[in-house]
Image (cartoon, rainbow, N blue to C red):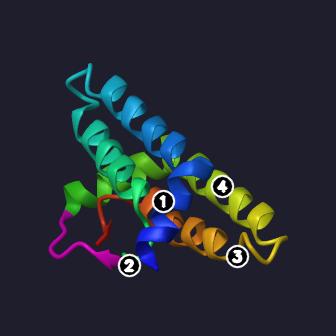
Amino acid sequence: MTLLGNILWLIFGGLLSGLGYILGGVALCLTIVGIPFGLQSIRLGVATFAPFGKEVRPVPGGGLLRLLFDVLWAVLFGWEIAVAHLVHAAILALTIVGIPFALQHLKLVPVALLPFHHELR
């Protein structure tokens, strides 16, 4: 069932979402300061390609640098991406067929908001 969900996800917008994350990550990697953020964006893009059958998990460890990166990410990029996932989820939840896809968008919100402390596995 997860394979079918992931295939439908890719056809109906997941491919474009993942490519957007990856292209944004490549653009961020063009600067030295943006490399950590670009790598996280690329990781998010790959995770966005197939969210069915995966769950959000906290990244073990931490530290002040990871917290600083999460705060910078949330202020500069993360809140817009999280709002976009919430809007997509709200629209998809209007139909019965869209509810599983809405749940996947809701699953991606914490990863999009704080990518240095969450991962999709």
Where does the C terminus fall, quadrant-wise? bottom left
Q: Is residue 64 magenta?
A: no
Question: Which of the two marks, 2 or 4, is nearer to us in this view?
Answer: 2
**In this rendering, position of residue 27 left or right of residue 74:** left
Q: Secondary structure at mark 2?
A: loop
Report the magenta residues as a range. Answer: 56-63
* Label of residue 99 in the image: 3
Question: Label 1 belongs to which residue?
Answer: 7
Q: Bin the neighbour count of mark 2 within 10 Å (Cα to Cα): few under 14, some 14-19, many 20 and up.
A: few
**In this rendering, position of residue 9 left or right of residue 99:** left
* Label of residue 55 in the image: 2
| Amino acid bearing label 2 | Glu
| Amino acid bearing label 3 | Ile
Q: Secondary structure at mark 1?
A: helix
**First reached walking from the N terminus: tag 1 or tag 3:** 1
Where residue 53 sits in the image (x, y, percent)?
Answer: 39, 77
**First reached walking from the N terminus: tag 4 or tag 3:** 4
Question: Label 4 belongs to which residue?
Answer: 83
Q: Are the residues tagged 4 and 1 within 8 Å (C-beta)?
A: no
Where residue 110 sits in the image (x, y, percent)?
Answer: 48, 68
The answer for how far apart the CA atoms under marks 4 and 1 are is 24 Å
Where residue 23 sits in the image (x, y, percent)?
Answer: 40, 29
Q: Quadrant of residue 36?
A: top left
Q: Are the residues tagged 1 and 3 within 8 Å (C-beta)?
A: no
**First reached walking from the N terminus: tag 1 or tag 2:** 1
Q: Bin the neighbour count of mark 4 within 10 Å (Cα to Cα): few under 14, some 14-19, many 20 and up.
A: some
